[in-house]
Image (cartoon, rainbow, N blue to C red):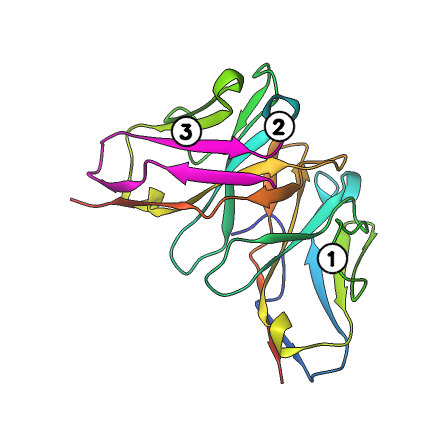
Amino acid sequence: QSVLTQPPSVSAAAGQKVTISCSGSSSNIGNNYVSWYQQLPGTAPKLLIYDNNKRPSGILDRFSGSKSGTSATLGITGLQTGDEADYYCETWDTSLTAVVFGGGTKLTVL
Amino acid sequence: QVQLVESGGGLVKPGGSLRLSCAASGFIFSDYYMSWVRQAPGKGLEWIAYITSTSDTIYYADSVRGRFTISRDNAKNSLYLQMTSVRAEDTALYYCVRDGVGAMPDFDYWGQGTLVTVSS
């Protein structure tokens, strides 16, 4: 069981918006920054969002991140078939003194 | 450009040992914290070890603490993972990752991974 809880799958139509949730606790999301990763099939993960809502250079503004309390959310607008991938949230857990990942969410673009 | 190239994976028997290496280039290796993250076949991501730039602080996941050792050689721009007493559940693709510029561990560059298979 992952410390961070994500829905196993989400889907939305091309061109629409989707959000992926990540639920944790005060020892992780509640008091630490959250990152998000995209893993396309057969490839290494790629950093999409860090420090809750910052995008690394080269990441399009179609991707956004937010945090409220002990939950974080990744938003993707203007969905494309190329966005079909697994998405993971990640943060530091102060109680565990460990990096923790969510279980991952598979995005399907209809 | 930043490159992380893992090596050392392969088939190992339960209870055996293996040493993974990661060759870093394209950035000042000694300035960055580094980690190992693994992914079992068909499963999600699991962080397993973290080391600061000067090796003064190291963290491990409970699943590998006492069996795996992370280390680095800044003169050789290399990161290592010594794996001992391996188990079937250690079978995974092992990624070398760089901790980015964020306030928390956030992994901005990933290698292509090296596959470790634990089987008799």
Question: Which residue occupies the extreme left position in the image?
Answer: B120
* Residue type at the position of mark 2: Tyr
Which quadrant of the figure has residue A76?
A: bottom right
Residue beneath the point at 32% across and 36% down = B8
Are the residues tagged 3 and 2 within 8 Å (C-beta)? no
Dot 1: few (<14), some (14–19), or many (≥20) neighbours within 10 Å? some
Check disc 2 and report the residue beneath it.
B33
Image point 49% across, 65% down: which residue? A41
Label 1 chain ID: A
| The magenta stretch spans residue B17 | yes
The residue range painted magenta reads B1-28
Pointer 3 chain? B
Instruction: Tell me where residue B108 appears, x and y as whole percent.
Output: 65, 43
Q: Which quarter of the image is occupied by the C terminus of chain B?
A: top left
Magenta run includes residue B18: yes
Which of pointers 3 and 2 lies earlier in the amino acid sequence? 2
Q: Position of residue B64 (x, y in %)?
A: 42, 32
**Which label sits in the foreground, 2 or 1?**
1
Chain ID at mark 2: B
Dot 3: what SS? strand
Q: Determine whether, in the image, residue A35 is placed left or right of residue A96.
A: right
Q: Nearer the viewer, residue B28 or A94?
A: B28
- Give the Cα separation between the discs numbered 3 and 2: 14 Å
Could you say which disc has been placed on residue B81 in the image?
A: 3
Instruction: State the residue position of label 1.
Output: A59
Q: CA distance from mark 1 to mark 3?
A: 30 Å
